[in-house]
C-alpha cells in the first residue's frame, strides 16, 4: 500500500516538474496584445523632433520636452499598431483612428520597446510585424546599423521574411502619415511589396538582407520615399561595407534584378520611328556562365531570355504590327535596350561601387570551386576585373487584340 | 480496503445462484398448490384455476399463471377448452381417460406448441414468473409448463437512435424473442446460434448470445460466456448493466462495447465474426468486440455506393477530430500563439475580443457548458418544447451574449461548429467520449498552449493504443498487420473488392466473396453447398447488390458484405 502511494507521488512529481519546466507559461489574451505592424528605426540626432507633430499621431503628447542628447539616447524607435476595436465597429476606444503611431528614444530596440510599454495599454507583440523601416541616418552609421540588424535578427517574435526598406529621410515619418488608400500602415507597405506588376524595387526580406550583409558586407535595400499621403517604393539603397553607399534609381534597380533573375513584370518603352512602344515583359530567364581563359581573366556571360507583349502602337497603322519584320525590329530594340541597362548597372557595380550585389562570388564558389580557390581571398578586386558579356534574346509573344 | 483497491478489485467471483432445482414437486396437488401459494403470498397477480378432467371428473387439475404476462386466448382455447371439453369428443375407448392422465394431457390433449415437463416445483415457479403457465395434476410428481408468454408490446418500430436514409426501418424491441426473430429473418443459416442464459439473481433476465458458429472467433466467444457467467447482480434492467460488467476497462472514456438498435447491423456484425448479446427488456443489443473504427461506421455506409460512403466516412472522422480539438486550438492560438494565424485574422479576433471581460478559456468553458446544458435539457423534453429550448438557447442566448459583449462572435462560431461536429459522429456514446475529452484538452491548452494540446492528444493516443476489447486492439485495424482491412476504415472500398472478412474479428471462413469461375463459396458444416447457395441468394427475395460479380454464400453479409444472402 505504501509503495503504491510512493509510486503515485513520484509519478505526479515527475509529470509536474516536466510540465512546469517545459510548458508555455506566457499566456496573454489576444486582445491584450498590441499588434505592431510596422517598426521604424532612426538614429537619434539631438534637436530633431521625436514626438511627431503629425495629426495622425494619436499618441501625441502636448508640450513634452524633446529628449536631450545623452549617450543613452541613440536611436528613435517608432511603432504603429492598428485600432483593432474599429474592426468590430462598436467597442473602439478612439473611433476615428485606424491606427496609432508612437515613438520613443532609447539605447537599443529592446529598451525602447519596454519604454513604449510603459505608455501603452497592452503588450507590444512583434509577431505580426509586416515591415521594418530604417532611416537614412541610421544606415549611414555603420555601428548602430549593425546593432539594429543583429537585434532584429535575434528577436524571436519577428519573422525572417518581413519586408525591409530604407527610407529616404526619417523612417519615423513613414509611420505618422495618414495614407490615402490603406489606413493601416504595416499592411499598406506589405501590399506594395506584394504586388507583382512592377520590378522597380528589390523586394528583399530581413533574412536575406542580413545574410547578404553577413556574406559580402553589402546589399541592396528597397528604397521608400514618404510623401504626404502615400509612399513610393522604388529604386534601392546600396549598402557597402555594412553602411550606406549610394541610392540607386528605379531603372538601375530593375536592370540589377534582371541580372539577379528576380525581375518581375514591367514595361520597357522603346522608340521606334517616333512612337514609344510599350513592351510588357512577362517572362524573364537568366543564364549565367563563368569561365577562365588562358590569361587567367574570369569571364562572366549573362544571357537573358525575355518574353513579352507589345502593348500599344498607334491607331493609324502605317506598319502592320503583325508583320514579321516589325516584330523583329521591336525584339532587337528591346534586346538592345535591356543589354544597355544591364551593362550600365554592371559597370557601375564593378567599377564605381565595387559591390557584388548578385553574389556572383557565391555562384563561383558553388559551381567552379577551382576558380574560387584562386580568387576567394581577393574576390572584391577580382570582381571589378571580371570581363562581363551580357546578351538578351527577346521574343514577342502577343501583340494584343486588334481589329 | 481503500477506494483505489475497491475500484481495481477483480469483479465478482463464482457463479451466481439463480435458484431452482432444489424442491421437487410433490404428487399431491394440494401440497404443490400450497407450496406455490406460500411462496407467492401477497402476489395478487397470480391466478389459480382448479378444474376437473375426465369422464367422471375424477382428475383434479390446477392451472396457474400470472395475469397480464400470458396470452389469455391461447390459455382459454388451447388449454382449458382442450382439457375440459374437447378431450371428451375424441373417439377414444372408454377407460382411456382413466389411464395415465399426465402423458395423455401432454401428448394428446394440450393443443399448444410449447409444453414441457418439470420435475422441480421451484424451477417451474420461475417459468411461471417469466410468463409460462403451469398445469398441476393431482397424483403426479411433475408439472406441465406451457409456453404461453404474451404481453403488451411496443411492436417493431423504426430505431430512434440510428435513423438511416437508406436501409431497413425495423428496430429491435423490448422483447428478446422478437429480437432474435429479427435476426433469424436476416440470417437463415443453421450456423446462426442463439444461446440463452439467465442473468440476475432477482430479475433472472433472459440474455441471448448470438453468433455465427463457423465464423466467430472461439476465443472471443469463450471470453464472452465466461464474463457473462461471472456477473452476479440482483437485477439486469438494461443492456448497459451487462456492458459495464463485461467491459475491459472501466476507467476508459471510450466505450469498448458497441450497442445498436438495428438488426441489420447486428446481422452484419455476426457475419464479421462478432458476438451479439441480446438482453431482454431493452432494444439495445450489445456487440463485441468493438473497435474505434467500428464505432465510426454506420450501416448506411454499406448501402450507399462506395464513393458517397467513403466521403461520409472521412467527414465523420474529421468531425470527430474537430469536436475534440477546435475550442482548444482557438484558446491556444489566441492566448499563446497569435503569431501563428494570418495577420488579418489575428487583428479581427483581437477586435472582436476587445471588451470581452473573460479570458478565452473561461469563455470557451462557459459556452461549451451552456451548450451541453441545452443538449441535456433538449433530450428530456418532449419534441416541440425541445425545439423551443433550441431556439431560445441557440439563437437568443447566443445572439444576445455577443451583443452584450460577454462572448466574442468567433467563440460562438467555434462552439457551434464543435457542437455540430460532435453530433456528426455516428455513435452516440463515442460522441459523448469526445465531448468529455474536449474539456480535458481545453484545460491543457489553456494552461500549456499548443504544447498542452499536443500533450493531451498524445495521452489519448497512448490510452487508445493500450485499450483492448475482448482481446482485440481498440485501434485495429489501424495498428497491426492488417492492411487488407484498411479498405474499411477511413474509406470504404467497393463491395466487390471486399473479398475477405476482417482478420481481427473473424476466426474462420475468411472468404466472403468468390470471384466467378471459382467454386461457390462454402457455408461450412451443415449449410447448403456451394452451387445451391448461389441460386438461393439470387432468388431469395432480399436481393443482392453484389450478385453480378461474385457468388454469394448463403449467409451473405447483410450490412457489410456484398449481396444479401438468403
Image (cartoon, grey):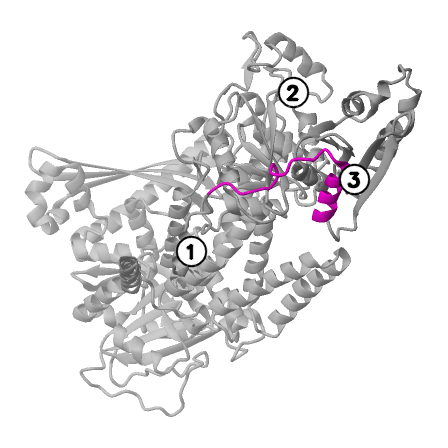
The residue that disc 3 covers is B64
Residue density around tag 2, few if under 14, some if 14–19, many if 20 or more, within 10 Å: many
Which of B385 and A96 lies nearest the eye of the viewer? B385
Label 1: chain letter: B
Same-subunit check for callouts 3 and 1? yes
- Determine whether B1 is above or below B307 in the image: below
Give yes or no for residue A25 being in the magenta stretch: no
- Dot 1 falls on a residue whose secondary structure is helix
- Determine whether B319 is above or below B331 in the image: above
State how far apart marks 3 and 1 are (Cα): 45 Å
Residues shaded magenta? B14-39
Mark with earlier residue (3, 1): 1
Label 2: chain letter: B
Q: Position of residue A251 (x, y in %)?
A: 34, 54
- Dot 2 falls on a residue whose secondary structure is loop
Q: Position of residue B19 (x, y in %)?
A: 60, 41
At 27% across and 65% down in the image, what residue appears? A155
Check contact, mark 1 vs mark 2: CB within 8 A. no
Q: Which mark is residue B6?
A: 1
Residue density around tag 1, few if under 14, some if 14–19, many if 20 or more, within 10 Å: few
Of the residues tagged 3 and 1, which is closer to the observer? 3
Which of A239 and A116 lies nearest the eye of the viewer? A116
State how far apart marks 3 and 2 are (Cα): 44 Å
Amino acid at each position: 500500500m505504501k509503495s503504491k502511494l510512493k509510486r503515485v507521488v513520484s509519478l505526479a512529481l515527475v509529470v509536474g516538474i516536466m510540465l512546469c519546466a517545459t510548458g508555455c507559461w506566457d499566456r496573454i489574451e489576444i486582445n491584450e496584445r498590441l499588434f505592431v505592424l510596422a517598426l521604424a528605426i532612426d538614429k537619434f540626432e539631438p534637436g530633431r523632433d521625436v514626438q511627431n507633430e503629425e495629426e495622425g499621431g494619436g499618441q501625441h503628447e502636448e508640450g513634452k520636452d524633446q529628449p536631450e542628447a545623452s549617450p543613452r539616447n541613440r536611436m528613435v524607435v517608432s511603432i504603429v499598431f492598428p485600432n483593432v476595436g474599429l474592426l468590430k465597429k462598436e467597442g473602439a476606444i478612439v473611433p476615428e483612428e485606424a491606427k496609432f503611431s508612437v515613438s520613443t528614444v532609447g539605447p537599443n530596440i529592446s529598451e525602447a520597446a519596454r519604454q513604449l510599454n510603459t505608455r501603452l495599454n497592452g503588450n507590444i507583440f512583434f509577431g505580426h510585424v509586416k515591415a521594418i523601416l530604417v532611416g537614412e541616418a541610421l544606415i549611414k552609421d555603420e555601428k548602430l546599423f549593425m546593432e539594429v540588424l543583429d537585434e532584429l535578427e535575434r528577436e524571436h517574435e519577428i519573422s525572417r521574411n518581413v519586408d525591409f526598406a530604407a527610407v529616404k529621410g526619417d523612417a519615423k515619418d513613414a509611420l505618422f502619415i495618414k495614407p490615402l488608400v490603406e489606413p493601416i500602415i504595416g499592411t499598406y507597405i506589405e501590399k506594395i511589396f506584394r504586388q507583382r506588376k512592377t520590378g522597380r524595387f528589390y523586394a528583399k526580406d530581413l533574412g536575406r538582407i542580413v545574410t547578404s550583409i553577413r556574406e559580402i558586407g553589402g546589399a541592396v535595400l528597397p528604397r521608400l520615399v514618404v510623401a504626404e499621403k502615400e509612399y513610393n517604393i522604388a529604386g534601392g539603397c546600396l549598402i557597402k561595407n555594412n553602411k550606406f553607399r549610394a541610392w540607386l534609381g528605379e531603372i538601375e534597380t530593375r536592370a540589377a534584378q534582371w541580372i539577379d533573375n528576380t525581375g518581375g513584370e514591367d514595361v520597357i518603352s522603346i522608340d521606334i520611328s517616333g512612337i514609344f512602344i510599350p513592351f510588357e515583359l512577362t517572362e524573364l530567364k537568366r543564364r549565367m556562365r563563368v569561365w577562365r581563359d588562358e590569361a587567367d581573366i574570369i569571364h562572366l556571360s549573362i544571357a537573358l531570355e525575355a518574353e513579352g507583349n507589345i502593348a500599344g502602337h498607334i491607331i493609324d497603322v502605317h506598319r502592320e504590327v503583325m508583320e514579321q519584320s516589325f516584330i523583329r525590329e521591336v525584339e532587337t530594340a528591346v534586346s538592345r535596350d535591356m543589354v544597355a541597362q544591364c551593362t550600365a548597372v554592371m559597370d557601375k557595380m564593378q567599377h564605381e561601387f565595387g559591390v557584388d550585389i548578385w553574389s556572383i562570388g557565391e555562384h563561383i564558389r558553388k559551381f567552379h570551386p577551382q576558380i574560387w580557390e584562386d580568387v576567394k581571398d581577393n574576390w572584391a578586386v577580382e570582381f571589378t576585373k571580371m570581363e562581363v558579356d551580357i546578351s538578351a534574346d527577346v521574343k514577342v509573344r502577343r501583340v494584343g487584340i486588334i481589329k | 480496503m481503500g477506494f483505489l483497491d475497491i475500484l481495481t478489485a477483480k469483479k465478482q467471483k463464482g457463479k451466481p445462484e439463480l435458484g431452482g432445482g432444489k424442491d421437487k414437486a410433490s404428487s399431491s396437488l394440494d401440497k404443490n398448490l400450497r407450496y406455490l401459494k406460500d411462496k407467492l403470498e401477497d402476489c395478487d397477480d397470480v391466478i389459480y384455476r382448479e378444474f376437473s378432467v375426465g369422464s367422471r371428473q375424477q382428475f383434479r387439475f390446477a392451472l396457474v399463471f400470472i395475469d397480464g404476462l400470458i396470452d389469455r386466448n391461447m390459455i382459454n382455447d388451447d388449454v382449458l377448452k382442450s382439457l375440459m371439453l374437447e378431450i371428451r369428443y375424441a373417439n377414444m375407448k372408454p377407460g382411456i381417460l382413466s389411464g395415465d392422465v399426465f402423458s395423455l394431457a401432454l401428448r394428446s390433449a394440450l393443443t399448444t406448441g410449447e409444453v414441457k415437463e418439470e420435475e422441480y416445483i421451484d424451477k417451474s415457479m420461475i417459468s411461471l414468473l417469466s410468463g409460462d403457465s403451469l398445469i398441476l395434476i393431482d397424483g403426479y410428481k411433475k408439472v406441465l409448463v406451457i409456453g404461453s408468454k404474451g404481453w403488451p408490446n411496443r411492436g417493431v418500430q423504426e430505431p430512434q437512435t440510428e435513423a438511416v436514409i437508406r436501409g431497413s426501418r425495423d428496430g429491435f424491441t423490448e422483447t428478446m424473442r422478437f429480437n432474435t426473430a429479427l435476426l433469424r429473418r436476416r440470417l437463415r443459416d443453421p450456423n446462426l446460434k442463439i444461446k440463452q442464459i439467465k442473468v440476475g439473481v432477482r430479475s433472472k433476465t433472459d440474455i441471448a448470445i448470438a453468433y455465427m458458429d463457423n465464423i466467430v472467433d472461439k476465443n472471443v466467444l469463450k471470453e464472452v460466456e465466461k464474463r457473462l457467467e461471472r456477473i452476479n447482480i440482483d437485477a439486469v434492467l438494461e443492456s448497459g448493466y451487462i456492458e459495464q460488467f463485461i467491459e475491459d476497462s472501466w476507467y476508459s472514456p471510450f466505450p469498448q462495447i458497441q450497442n445498436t438498435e438495428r438488426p441489420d447491423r447486428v446481422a452484419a456484425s455476426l457475419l464479421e465474426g462478432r458476438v451479439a448479446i441480446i438482453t431482454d427488456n431493452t432494444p439495445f443489443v450489445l456487440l463485441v468486440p468493438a473497435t474505434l473504427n467500428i464505432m465510426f461506421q454506420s450501416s448506411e455506409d454499406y448501402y450507399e455506393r462506395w464513393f458517397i460512403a467513403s466521403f461520409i466516412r472521412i467527414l465523420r472522422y474529421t468531425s470527430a477530430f474537430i469536436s475534440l480539438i477546435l475550442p482548444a486550438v482557438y484558446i491556444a492560438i489566441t492566448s499563446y500563439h497569435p503569431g501563428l494565424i494570418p495577420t488579418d485574422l489575428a487583428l479581427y479576433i483581437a477586435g472582436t475580443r476587445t471588451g470581452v471581460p473573460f479570458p478565452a478559456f473561461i469563455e470557451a468553458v462557459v459556452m461549451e457548458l451552456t451548450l451541453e446544458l441545452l443538449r441535456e435539457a433538449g433530450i428530456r423534453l418532449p419534441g416541440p418544447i425541445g425545439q423551443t429550448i433550441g431556439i431560445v438557447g441557440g439563437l437568443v442566448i447566443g445572439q444576445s451574449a455577443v451583443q452584450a459583449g460577454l462572448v466574442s462572435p468567433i467563440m460562438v462560431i467555434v462552439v457551434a461548429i464543435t457542437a455540430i461536429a460532435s453530433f456528426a459522429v455516428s455513435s452516440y456514446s463515442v460522441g459523448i467520449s469526445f465531448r468529455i475529452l474536449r474539456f480535458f484538452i481545453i484545460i491543457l491548452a489553456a494552461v500549456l498552449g499548443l504544447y498542452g494540446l499536443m500533450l493531451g492528444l498524445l495521452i489519448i493516443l497512448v490510452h487508445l493504443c493500450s485499450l483492448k476489447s475482448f482481446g482485440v486492439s481498440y485501434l485495429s485495424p489501424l495498428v497491426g498487420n492488417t492492411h487488407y482491412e484498411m479498405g474499411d476504415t477511413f474509406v470504404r472500398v467497393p463491395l466487390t473488392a471486399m473479398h475477405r472478412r476482417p482478420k481481427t474479428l473473424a476466426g474462420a471462413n475468411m472468404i466472403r466473396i468468390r470471384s466467378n469461375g471459382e467454386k461457390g463459396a462454402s457455408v461450412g458444416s451443415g449449410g447448403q453447398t456451394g452451387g445451391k447457395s448461389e441460386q438461393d441468394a439470387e432468388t431469395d427475395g432480399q436481393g443482392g447488390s453484389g450478385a453480378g460479380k461474385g457468388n454469394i454464400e448463403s449467409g451473405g453479409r447483410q450490412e457489410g458484405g456484398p449481396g444479401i444472402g438468403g
